[in-house]
Image (cartoon, rainbow, N blue to C red):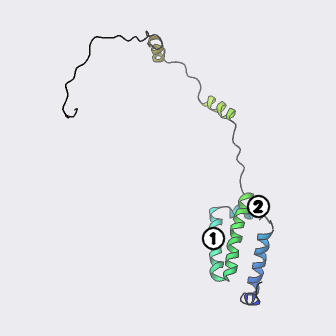
Amino acid sequence: MISTAFFKSMTVPEIAISILAVAFLMFDVSPPEMIATQIDTPIGMGVLVILAIYVFMSFHPILGVIFILVAYELLRRSSHIATVAYVTPTQEKKDRELAEMNPIMPATLEEELINSMAPIGKSSIISYTTSEYSPVADDTFGASLI
């Protein structure tokens, strides 16, 4: 149980703010969209952090801890409201757009000549021959190869 000495150490506005903060944490109250879009920016997050540090340093420590939890929950709830739904195009649409940007180019003179003269697929089958030659090497006695 919470003792009366705990409540006597807090002022009436601190008790009221703590009750409102605990109610915000307990109930699923979403912030208005206008406020949520401002909180879900880097400046809004910075303001919340500075405000949390100020509350923690200036008021009762319990109120500071509660406000840090409220700030985190406010950030979390604001991010769900202010998110923008991105629609990703389908692969067929991407392929169609890329085909429009990259039309098929006719073959150049160089490509036509290479295709007509290249021996790709037109060479003879490789045949191996056996030979009487057998290489003879002397022992190098630990010398290194250069």
Foreground label between 2 and 1: 1
Distance in Å between CA atoms under marks 2 and 1: 20 Å
Name above or below for residue 26 compared with residue 140.
below
- Disc 2 marks a residue whose amino acid type is Glu
Picture residue at 71% right of the left edge, 55% below the top? 83
The picture places residue 70, in percent across and down from the top left corner, at: 71, 71
Q: Secondary structure at mark 1?
A: helix
Quadrant of the rendered structure where residue 125 is? top left
Mark 2 vs mark 1: which is more N-terminal?
2
Judge from the rendering whether residue 109 lies leftward or rightward of residue 29; answer left or right.
left
Quadrant placement of the N terminus: bottom right
Name above or below for residue 98 compared with residue 123.
below
134 vs 114, nearest the viewer: 134
Pointer 2: what residue?
33
Q: Secondary structure at mark 2?
A: helix
Picture residue at 70% right of the left edge, 47% below the top? 86
User: Can you tell which mark lies on residue 21?
Assistant: none
Picture residue at 47% right of the left edge, 16% below the top? 109
Name above or below for residue 102 compared with residue 11.
above
The picture places residue 129, in percent across and down from the top left corner, at: 35, 10
Picture residue at 67% right of the left edge, 76% below the top? 65
Quadrant placement of the C terminus: top left
Label 2: few (<14), some or many (≥20) within 10 Å? few
Label 1: few (<14), some or many (≥20) within 10 Å? some
User: Can you tell which mark lies on residue 49?
Assistant: 1
The picture places residue 79, in percent across and down from the top left corner, at: 71, 59
Quadrant of the rendered structure where residue 2 is? bottom right
The picture places residue 43, in percent across and down from the top left corner, at: 63, 65
- Disc 1 marks a residue whose amino acid type is Val
